[in-house]
Image (cartoon, rainbow, N blue to C red):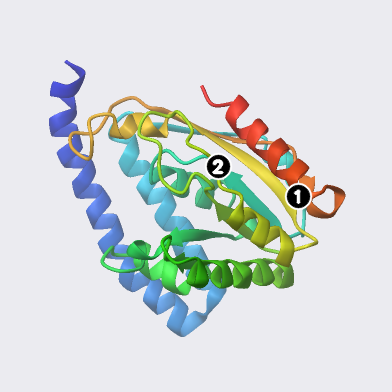
Amino acid sequence: MHKILSYPLSIVYYLFLSLSLLLFHPIQWICLKLFGYQAHKTSVDILQWFLMRSANILGTTFNVEGREKLPQNKPIIYVSNHQSMFDIVSIIWFLRATHPKFVSKKELGKGIPSVSFNLKYGGSVLIDRNDPKQALPAIKGLGEYIQKHNRSAVIFPEGTRSKTGKPKRFSENGVKMLCKFAPDAYVVPLTINNSWKMFRFGMFPMGLGSALKLQVHEAMKVSDFDFATLFQKTEEAIVSSIK
């Protein structure tokens, strides 16, 4: 019954999703070209609100816990598990005060209205996961950027989405590079729960009634730990809260 009901609702969802992405693509361009960074960021934030409302059509709910733990006016390195594209939507919206920028695969940098534009021009970095010679300098640049501007970087050390919610092996290289070039940063582990359920049947039809939760864990100052200890504590915090 769940899957049968999801077919018509998925059609309506994709209609609203597509309209939102198409509408905000020129809005982003105008905001960035005419009014600069802050106007562009605001347009991206508002887009996330529309994307979340689109997901509400499927009965999806969004919740965040622990934002009060975030350090103020400091560079932040968010390290998160990864279950679906709505992880990114939730992070941008709920953590918007910290200006999150993403380490994303280069394939997302073209062909997706609004999304590709923001990744290319909003401060995030696009990497070739098969080319460390390109990826690590790009991540280095992001570390230097958040160090200079007191903004935040988001990295998914699993490297790809978990289709079942079960976490994959965490890779330390990108996190280590960010920590090295943002020495004043705080690492903040994030746990995402239930966003994979939106795609339990694949891209179509969509899953219904997913209760997506973003959990913010205690911040850890990079300079207070050796990297091995910091990475272990980060992974343990994330994985221990996946349900």
Q: Residue at x 23, y 54 (%)?
A: 18
Q: Residue at x 72, y 40 (%)?
A: 68
Give x and y (percent) for residue 200.
28, 29
Give x and y (percent) for residue 219.
75, 43
Left or right of residue 58: residue 103? right
Left or right of residue 10: residue 101? right
The residue wearing badge 2 is: 170
Give neighbour class at mark 1: few <14, some 14-19, many 20+ (Cα, 10 Å). some
Quarter assignment of residue 30: bottom left
Left or right of residue 105: residue 224? right
The residue wearing badge 1 is: 227
Q: Amino acid at mark 1?
A: Phe
Q: Secondary structure at mark 1?
A: helix
Alpha carbons under labels 2 and 1: distance apart: 14 Å
Give neighbour class at mark 2: few <14, some 14-19, many 20+ (Cα, 10 Å). some
Give x and y (percent) for residue 141.
61, 73
Q: Give the vertical position of 185 relative to 120 (above or below).
A: above
